[in-house]
Image (cartoon, rainbow, N blue to C red):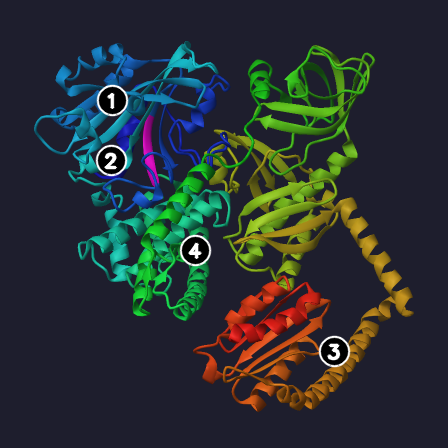
Amino acid sequence: MKSSEIREKFLKYFESYGHKRVKSSSLVPANDPTLFFTNAGMVQFKEVFLGQEQRPYSTATSSQKCMRVSGKHNDLENVGHTPRHHTFFEMLGNFSFGDYFKKDAIAYGWEFLTKTMGLDPNRMYVTVFREDDEAEKLWTKHVSKDRIFRLDEDDNFWAMGDTGPCGPCSEILWDFGSGPVKKEDFETTRFMEIWNLVFMQYNRDAEGNMNPLAKPSIDTGMGLERLAAVKQGVTSSWETDLFVPLIEKIEKVTGVELGSSEQNDIALRVIADHIRGSVFLVADGVTPSNEGRGYVLRRIMRRAIRYGKMLGMDRPFFAQIAHVVVDQMGQAYPELVQHQKFAEKVIAVEEERFYEALDKGLVLLDEEFGALKKAKKKVLPGAVAFRLYDTFGFPKDLTDIIAGEQGFTVDGKGFEDEMSQQRERGRSAWKGSGEEAVAEVWMDIQKKTPSQFVGYTKESAEAMVTAVVKDGKPVDSAGAGDQVMFTTNLTPFYGESGGQMGDTGMAVGNGIEVEIVDTKKPLPDLIVHVGTVKKGTLAPDAKLTMAINSDRRADIRRNHTATHLLHKAMREVLGEHVKQAGSLVAPDRLRFDFSHFQAVTKEELKQIEEHANKAVRENFEVTPCEMSYDEAVEKGALAFFGEKYGDEVRMVDVSGFSRELCGGTHVSATGEIGLIKVMAESSVAAGVRRIEAVTGRGAIAYVERLESERNELAKFLKVQPGELVTRVRKLADDNKKLEQKMKSARTEQAGASVGDLVAKAQDVGGVKLVAERVEGIDQGSMRDLGDRVRDKLQSGVIVLGAEVGGKAALIVMVTKDLTKKIRAGDIMKELATVVGGKGGGRPDMAQGGGPDVSKLDDALNKVKELIQ
């Protein structure tokens, strides 16, 4: 049975018992900032289990894409070495939110495995929590008591966190072997956990007390890869149809066959696992970077590419296998198909960057080997090998080979010590994404009195205060001068979300006056007003007239619709790979981050601006409408990375031009925007660019500012504004001619001093040394002077120092006949530290410097000592 059939049979089985089929959420948790990645099927239901969110169903089933890169059984380094460790995997699950409990969960699990899947019941064992008599009794209806084992908390008790819902769990394990069974056997490869049934029946408080839940719930998880291995009669995930096509493709690309050696097999498995994780992460909006989720993605990409290099791949190959993941999984996860080209481009660009890093790593190795030879040492420090691994992506095996060729060994223990520290740092970093969790106070308020947003059609409304919060705690009232946050039953104020800033305005009523300076949206159904009480007493149940700053909202509307027009224009000009990666919609400007892999040229920016402004002039009607997510996507609506969408979504249709899913406020027709003017384009991160623009009143202010600056420049240069370009060009030409004259004069002066410098050469242990300070010279002229002195000296070391731009500048040259024993780069490293800076270079030439000019002579005096 194919894995795609197993997945579908699982979902259909639970649908037949009334479970709602819920599609997989993103690998980037939209509802849990304490997690780096979605690591279990229950993550998207966390608020439901906590009672903070209501769903129109009480039972559900899903096949959830998951990512785990750290934890008890998921260290990255295990992948490829064991039969079933993976970074990316699918978790099949069924859930009950206060509906059925242990009896049905156990019955469903056993029936699905033995009847629907047809698995041999005699090959399965069950574990329960040591104190869970109820679960054991229920299991005896399906399996004999000798096949049920009681285990401790580490294996059979689950908790959502230090506090909150928790409970015992029961695992179903598959036996790959035969003969008598002991508890200890469950930790060996003879057994594989198939399914974990979690019985959430307690709520643990801060003191550690276990209080029974009013509505016990069920959360289960079964790895598709593991069930596929059992059903397909193999002993590891790598042999299933989820991995075989990938490994076959990698064999074809690398020319290395599975079974040729254990090391090659590990490499093939690592690459197969990591391409799955990479494609799925990119499709969910994660791009490689040096921090957060992007850093994890970069690590797994580079780990795979390193293993490819071990297989002899000296050219990019990783992106070539991405399409196999899409071919296999695209039907179940349509976002893979939608973002295939983008994923392939991201992976290809990261490969190119990595190969560049490898070249830099080889330069570092050459320098280290030179220093070791000089010190007459034969062991490369473990810290250096680890730096090559962590910074430049060198596998230790590769470092071992290169070191061996040069007659060195690598300090393996030192390397492992560094790796252990890295793992500890990684475990700490992967505890969460670094974002703040939503305050408990807002969860409680949303549960009792959610907010209704009426601001799409109204700019003022009558409302009733539902809660007043001061200093993070609910209060009964707040008086004049108090800074508060408050909620109302309905509001025309837009809460900051989707990149759009929150509204400002006033709230008045019965002697109460509150100035609202910001509006937040901490939860999907809660809008929080931030402000200062100017008059009266603000308290729950107070009736207020809420009125937004209409002019400010109008500016925001223009900028928000403009982001949609610019997004569409960029996709037309730059390509379909362009996706929104973040935005800011403010009243005075807009900022739009997007996926792209090189700077946008001036000509491209001009075209983007023209396309967007043409849509403004066309005065397209802008129509927001509610519909199902699937229907909106079918109509061509763009869904943004990082956004959480429900079954019902709001699509903003700019008639005949663009369609995007968006909860923000917009103009009714594009002509209201007036003008879109792009002000700047820049880099944000690897593969992410940013444009900044203004519209409407902001565009007018921008043009007026430019005109004012133009007139001021014309006045300063004593020309008419229309003559500015001609005048500046003439000034630039005159300046260039003066610079050329000065350079010629400096060159003549340098030529005249060559003889003087050579005459000052010292003999240091048989080596000629010129170490002198020169004046009135720039970096380029100093290099020219050094070349001339070297040529005339024929054999020796030349070190020149000068004050250039208020800093100490140094250059070191070593003639070719001496570079085996004296390296310019080594000397420069020492000298640069004297002047408070850094430097380096080739064995024959190096340059550098530092901010401390007062130490320049000390640096020059140190050269003789270094050569000795």
Say which label, 1 or 3, has the lower sequence index.
1
- Label at residue 387: 4
Element carrying mark 2:
helix
Question: Crowding at label 4, few (<14), some or many (≥20) Cα neighbours within 10 Å?
Answer: some
Task: Give the Cα distance between marks 4 and 3.
Answer: 41 Å
- Label at residue 179: none
Q: Closer to the observer: label 1 or label 4?
A: 4
| Near-viewer residue (581 or 823) | 823
Please name the amino acid that badge 3 sits on. Gly
Task: Give the Cα distance between marks 1 and 4.
Answer: 48 Å
Q: Which residue is mark 3?
A: 776
Question: Crowding at label 2, few (<14), some or many (≥20) Cα neighbours within 10 Å?
Answer: many
Residue range corresponding to the magenta coloring: 88-93
Element carrying mark 3:
loop
Q: Which residue is mark 1?
A: 109
Residue 727: image x %, image y %?
Answer: 84, 73
Magenta stretch secondary structure, dominant: strand
Task: Give the Cα distance between marks 4 and 2.
Answer: 36 Å
Say which label, 4 or 2, has the lower sequence index.
2
Q: Closer to the observer: label 4 or label 2?
A: 4
Residue 376: image x %, image y %?
Answer: 38, 68
Please name the amino acid that badge 1 sits on. Gly
Please name the amino acid that badge 2 sits on. Arg
